[in-house]
Image: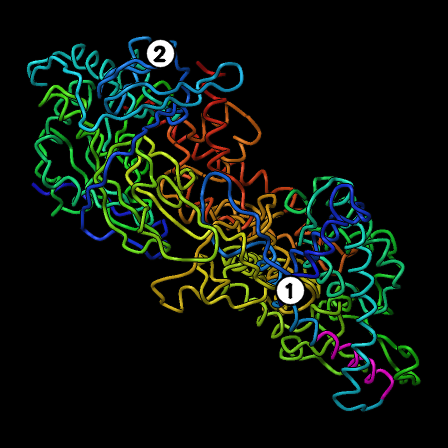
Amino acid sequence: MMANTIKITKGLDIKISGKAAEKISKIPHSAVFEVNPESYHGITPKVLVKEGDTVNAGTPLFHEKSFPEMNFVSPVSGKVREIVRGERRKVMHITIDTDKTIEYKKFSVKKPSDSTADEIRALMLESGLWSFMRQRPYDIIPNPAKSPKAIFISTFDTAPLAPDYEFIIRDQLADFQTGVDALSKLTSGNVHLGLKSDASVFSTVKGVIATVFSGPHPAGNVGVHINHINPVNKGEVVWTIHPQDVLFIGRLFNKGIVDLTRLVALTGPEVENPQYFETISGNNISEIIKGNLKKVSYPLRFISGNVLVGRKITENGFLAPCCSQISVIDEGTETHEMLGWAMPRFNKFSASRLYLTKLLRKKEFKYDARLMGGRRAIIMSGEYDKVFPMDILPEHLIKAMIAKNIDKMENLGAYEVAPEDFALCEFVDTSKLPLQAIVRYSLDFLKSEVE
Amino acid sequence: MNKLRNLVDKIKPDFEKGGKFEKLHSVFDGFETFLFVPNTTSKRGTHIHDAVDSKRTMIMVVLALVPALLFGMYNVGYQHFMAIGQDAGFWATFWFGFLSVLPIVLVSYIVGLGIEFVVAQIKGHEIQEGFLVTGFLIPLIVPVDTPLWMIAVATAFAVIFAKEVFGGTGMNIFNVALITRAFLFFAYPSAMSGDKVWIRTQDTFGFGGGQVVDGFSGATPLGQIATSASPTIQITDMFGHQFSFMDAVTGFIPGSIGETSVIAIAIGAFLLLLTGVASWKTMLSVFAGGTLMALIFNHFGPDTAAANLPWYYHLVLGGFAFGAVFMATDPVTSSRTETGKWIYGFLIGVMAIVIRVLNPGYAEGMMLAILLMNIFAPLIDYYVVDANVKRRLKRAVNK
């Protein structure tokens, strides 16, 4: 059956070099793994282990204070090395001395089709896999007390240099199907699958409503899919989950273990051999980047995620739980461009017509982490609209957010968006405003005021 | 380049907190970011950014204004030498205009940027580029014989009360250059209207002196129409020769310095539209509104010269084209929604013609029309945004 096709016209494909080749290398687990509660936005962790405790992959390390059944588990087996606390005893991170071979905690499982929704919910909370899902509104880990009207999975990522999930998952479709079967029990509505094309390997997945999205980035963003298919109204909840994380749910129900093995794409202009690595979140990225970077004299920036929404980490940083990509770019602090406002700057990418980007038809441009200008009040109009393919007025929503106007935020679509939806707006913004930070802050503010 | 960079790095500490010239930090920062793209990197959020910034955007607008300025300079000389009955040749004509206009440009920039520098330092902000455009617009929309002290006072008033009190670049409700013009118009009416100010009859710095030819009249075409007693249209040059439509298009007519040549303005418009800095929707709809309203007056209006003026004359005379291209499209004071831009532009065109035709006190309506619509732009946006809100609420109910 042909899936419905939705054509996205607004958006922007950023031309940047360093896409991962379809090649997988296995890398060793580092001696120490790190779990960082900061990776899970909005939770208050209560630690369940002590330093020196032995844990298996799947053993809870901490749980959420307001939902004690919501566990966050160890990705590997080993010994708890250190629980680092910061100001006011806030848990900064937990480190684990890793075993050579991973021991898995055993969960008793049934096939999803033989399980009730409550059983599946309980198992996902217990096994820590709940934390891989996101809820809209607020872009947080789903509130277990609320049932979603639909669950959305985008099976493709259009962000710059994004990993190719067709390549990653094509040999693991059985686990993916099981994961989808489990998820579909958790919603009264449907599981929606966003596909890249009708020829997608995901088009064989059963029990879902598949929709093809074509067009430039952010055509692969799940927020765009939700807005076009079943938008979030006030009081409604939808869940989303990344395709690799669906595999974890599938493995849990097929094998009874929490196996967080995933492929991570090492990408970016400063990477010598961009490719995929098989690893586990919590691993040190130095294992991945070792020997794979270009030899350069300038400082580099390492990003857990893509260049638009990822988090800045150090070269000894740890892989975040949902991370499927590491990007490496020039930090840019050593670059001094004279009279940039007047120069042609042929090697710079711009979505505007103030540069010759479009005429040059080049494939690659030079990028670094500079803002490329000074921060200003919003001056130009219509910039955000051109890269924001939703029935939302982005500039007006942002202004309502800056003004902390709750009624306006609600009315203009704050419940439908996540910070990542504004990444392209932030990229093209002449005024260089931190739009994703504004959205993140405002969603937290909205939640604290409304709930 | 490295030498310059080293020099900047060397003196930089003096301008930072605790340095000798701490009080000039904003000025230093302004010059540093002018010389070098700032090295600030993103801490969170998007790690890479588009190469566009507000400096480049503003400079593009300034570039687009250059043809109008150059032509304006030439036309000042052209009108002057015609008035004194001399043929000075191309370069002397331009030189006279250059000498006459340059002081206005300097006064506008020195006063405006001076205030911006001080305010930026007081607030601890970066110096912003908005005034680069405003300071360039002001000389183009005033008559050449406006006393410089008036321009200084008006610029200071506009920058302080129309911009800085609202929060600076991007926060103003009214177009700052037009507030300067409006201030001049209402504060010094005798110096800003009538037929004495549009053509410089005196010498400039001792250059280009001469006696005004007999029978000279320096009224602008729109001024002539507004004061015309008969309903037939008589627009003439200073010696009573009829102006043709092409004279108005090329711009060899009296008027504010930069507004007369539709060709020079069209070059600027082309640049703005090509680079996408100005909205074609706003621009087009101003002309559409003006055309429609003028046609209505042509057919159903009162029997006056202004109402009888053919619609295509309305679009090329006075500040209509200049306002449509450079003033109405100011993104800060215009409607910010795409639908709103159509309405906003259209109403500017309509209002400009209504004021021209129906209000005998004002020969030109463009300035007031744009300022008026500046007030209404947020209201237009309110209704456009409200439609989106209603659609969203309906969606929730209809399920």
Q: In the rendering, at what x and y percent does residue B58 appear?
A: 62, 58
Badge 1 element: helix
Report the Cα–Cα distance between label 2 and label 1.
Answer: 66 Å
Residue B96 occupies quadrant: bottom right
Disc marking residue B62? 1
Question: Left or right: where does residue B109 sit relative to residue B206?
Answer: left
Residue A420 occupies quadrant: top left
* Screen quadrant of the C terminus of chain A: top left
How many callouts does the rendering have?
Answer: 2
Q: In the rendering, at what x and y percent does residue B268 appear?
A: 59, 68
Disc marking residue A50? 2
- How would you rate the neighbour count of disc 1 (Cα within 10 Å): few for under 14, some for 14-19, many for 20 or more? some
- How would you rate the neighbour count of disc 2 (Cα within 10 Å): few for under 14, some for 14-19, many for 20 or more? some
Q: Which amino acid, mark 2?
A: Lys
Q: In the rendering, at what x and y percent does residue B95 appear?
A: 79, 82
Q: Is residue A293 visible?
A: yes
Q: Which amino acid, mark 1?
A: Val
The chain holding disc 1 is B
Establish if B169 lies above or below A243.
Answer: below
Badge 2 element: loop
Name the residue rendered at 60%, 56% in the picture.
B349
Establish if A403 lies above or below B349.
Answer: above
Residue A94 occupies quadrant: top left
Q: A326 or A439: which is nearer to us?
A: A326
